[in-house]
Amino acid sequence: MKKQMVTLILLIGIIMTITSGCSTMPASEQTVWRFGHEEILGGIQDIYALEFKRLVEERTDGEITVEIYRADEIGGVMDYLEFQQGGLLQFSILNPGTTSTTVPENNVFYNHFLLPEEDDDIKEVLRNSKAIEMLNEINERNELKVLDWFYEGFNAWTSNKPIRSPKDFRGISIRTMASPLIVASYQAYNANPTPMPYMEIYTGLQLNQIDAQVNPVFAIQEMGFYEVQKYLIQARQDGFFAALVTNPDFFNDLEPEMQEMIREIALELNDFIFDVQDSLNKERLEMIREASDIEIIELTQEEREVFREASGKAREVFKSSVGEEGREILRILEEDTARVLEKKDK
């Protein structure tokens, strides 16, 4: 506990030093909002954060400045969660694998084959589902006010052997986040899920500490995972989701006009980032093709169905890890996805 307090004090000092060092106006005339996210320079979350910064500073005529802290700059992802809940960060982007330690219901997005496959259909579910409202209410009870859920693309697998069915996962150690649901999902596929910090994946693959990993295509490219793997497999089993969050006390203390400005910006960013992730993931896949001889495998619908059937075991793990609200959120998302797909087929 003493060590944690010392670390926290040091981090607060770093933040204050950076803040004062970046100021171009007297402190009495300037408001600084600190914004943390989990990715490196140029990632989707970074693009999102930079656009948030631009819009806030533009609409407040520079009276508010936004300082961005990327992966591991002032701590790990769990530190960023604690800083957000404690008010040290005014805004942050956190993924469900991180926040599920506080809100297990957030893991709902990691149920494989839950949401539609097409971006527009995913957007429709996220924007119109009562399940999202319920999820946001649970988060707010845990000092996380969600302003936006957005999607960074489907997760893909990289491995040193081709994977076309769950039996191909036997004996493979795959890096995952520490979420119990994600772990259960890959156990259901016969893999050996191995939680590991994001910034250690490349070295883990290089040193054969792990055999495979799972991330969106843009992350596979920017982190260089394709350099130390032989196959990239697209099963479209689940997407990588993230949330723009703020501290409820901070938000509630803002003037109503400022709250409305933030809500409007979050809505604009949702459209913006859906387009960004689509073009960026396509662009990064081409970059991988051009820069390496990695074999890219797109699973057929028949092959995906085998994984879909196997994933049912993990869905039961989710249901047992949450209460009645969480099970209702899952049920509504299942129904909303079916409704969206049925409407498309008409």
Image (tube, helix red, strand yellow):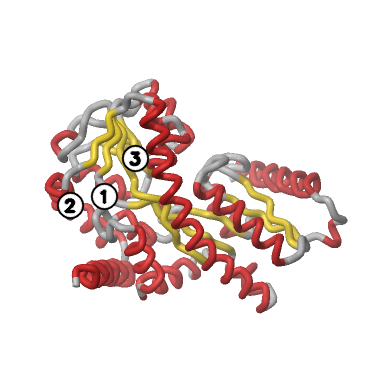
Q: Is residue 204 above or below residue 46?
A: above
- Type of residue at label 2? Arg
Quickly name the residue at label 1. 237
Q: How many marks?
A: 3
Report the residue at 44% width, 50% height from top.
277
Q: CA distance from mark 2 to mark 3?
A: 17 Å
Find residue 336 and report its horizontal and vertical position in percent.
28, 71
Residue at screen point 25% across, 48% down:
185
Amino acid type of disc 3? Val
Q: Which residue is mark 3?
A: 214
Mark pair 3, 1: CA separation: 11 Å
* Vertical side of 9 occupied by 225: above or below: above
Crowd band around label 3 with a 10 angstrom C-alpha radius: few (<14), some (14–19), many (20+)? many
Distance of label 1 from label 2 (alpha carbons): 8 Å
| Residue 27 percent location from the top left of the image | 84, 57
Mark nearer the N terminus (1 vs 2): 1
Task: Confirm or deny contact between disc 1 and disc 2 (CB under 8 A).
Answer: yes
In the depicted view, which residue is nearer to us: 226 or 250?
Answer: 226
The residue at 24%/45% (across/down) is 235
Q: Position of residue 309 (x, y in %)?
A: 14, 52
| SS for callout 1 | loop
Residue 243 visible in rendering: yes
- Asked whether, in this view, residue 25 is left or right of residue 334, the answer is right
Q: Which label's residue is closer to the chain start, 2 or 3?
A: 3
* Quarter of the rendering occupied by the N terminus: top right
Q: List the residue tagged with mark 2.
A: 308
